[in-house]
Amino acid sequence: MNVSPFVESPTYVVRKMLQLAEPKPDEILYDMGSGDGRILIMAAKEFQLRCIGIEIRQDLFKRSMDEVKRLNLESRINIINKDFFNVNISDADIVTLYLNASANEKLRPKLEKELRTGTRVISHDYEIRGWKPTKIVKNNPTGHKIYSYVFDPSKIFVSLGSKISHPEIGHRLPEIF
Ligand SMILES: C[S@@+](CC[C@H](N)C(=O)[O-])C[C@H]1O[C@@H](n2cnc3c(N)ncnc32)[C@H](O)[C@@H]1O
């Protein structure tokens, strides 16, 4: 099920997302809906991560794989042309998202089932309702936001009646980048 149209994260947002994840070389990053592969490529080139992209659209899968081959990054980047709901991501150290609020909501049970405690989840523009971010940053003047989470099953807010899932952070101003 395609849950989000293709829109690229700007390069400066990608770099900030990766910095917020505090990556260590050779950690495993998954980009859920990897588009043209830009997050994977920067993560491999600048942060020495091992990257897996999951992309449902065949044209984007082909385009991103061509770029990975052109850059000789095949040993670091693997892209899977599948629906991410059907791919196990339990070995992730870092998960990146640029979807939308309802897609994040659909994905949340999968993340909670498969991720290990301590996995960093970094979401461009859209929060994961029911999770408490460790950090929210906002770009000036573009307004792009990044929500950074460290997955901890004991800190999940189970009652999701309210749309404001983390009120104690909601009224704090995000850090500007
Ligand atoms: C907003 S784009 C983000 C692209 C890239 N991650 C970035 O930040 O530049 C979302 C991507 O998710 C893909 N997508 C949507 N639903 C998907 C699904 N169920 N499985 C895999 N990819 C999906 C879309 O085709 C699109 O390329």
Image (cartoon, rainbow, N blue to C red):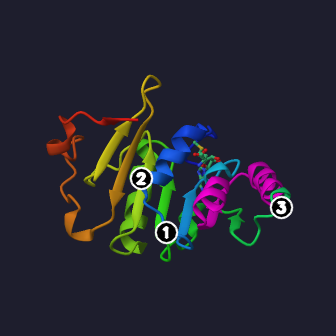
Tell me if I can see residue 98 in this picture: no
Amino acid type at mark 3? Lys
Marks 2 and 3, how far apart in space?
27 Å
What mark, if any, has residue 146 been given in the picture? none
Amino acid type at mark 2? Leu
Residue placed at 68% from the left, 52% from the top? 37
Q: Name the residue tied to disc 1.
A: 24
Q: Main secondary structure of the magenta part?
A: helix
Residue placed at 61% from the left, 57% from the top? 46
Residue 45 percent coordinates (x, y): 66, 58
How many neighbours does mark 1 have within 10 angstroms: few (below 14), some (14-19), or many (20 or more)? few
Residue placed at 57% from the left, 68% from the top? 86
Marks 2 and 1, how far apart in space?
12 Å
SS for callout 2? helix
Residue 24 percent coordinates (x, y): 49, 69
Marks 1 and 3, how far apart in space?
24 Å
Q: Tell me if 106 is positioned left or right of 75 in this view.
A: left
Amino acid type at mark 1? Lys
Q: Tell me if 159 is positioned left or right of 90 in this view.
A: left
SS for callout 3? helix
Residue placed at 80% from the left, 57% from the top? 71
Q: Name the residue tied to disc 2.
A: 20
SS for callout 1? loop
Which sits in the foreground, 145 or 20?
A: 20
Compared with residue 30, is residue 62 higher up or lower down, i.e. above or below? Answer: above
Q: Nearer the viewer, mark 1 or mark 3?
A: 1
Q: Which range is magenta?
A: 40-68
Which sits in the foreground, 30 or 58?
A: 30
Residue 110 percent coordinates (x, y): 43, 66
Which part of the image, by quadrant, shows the C terminus? Answer: top left
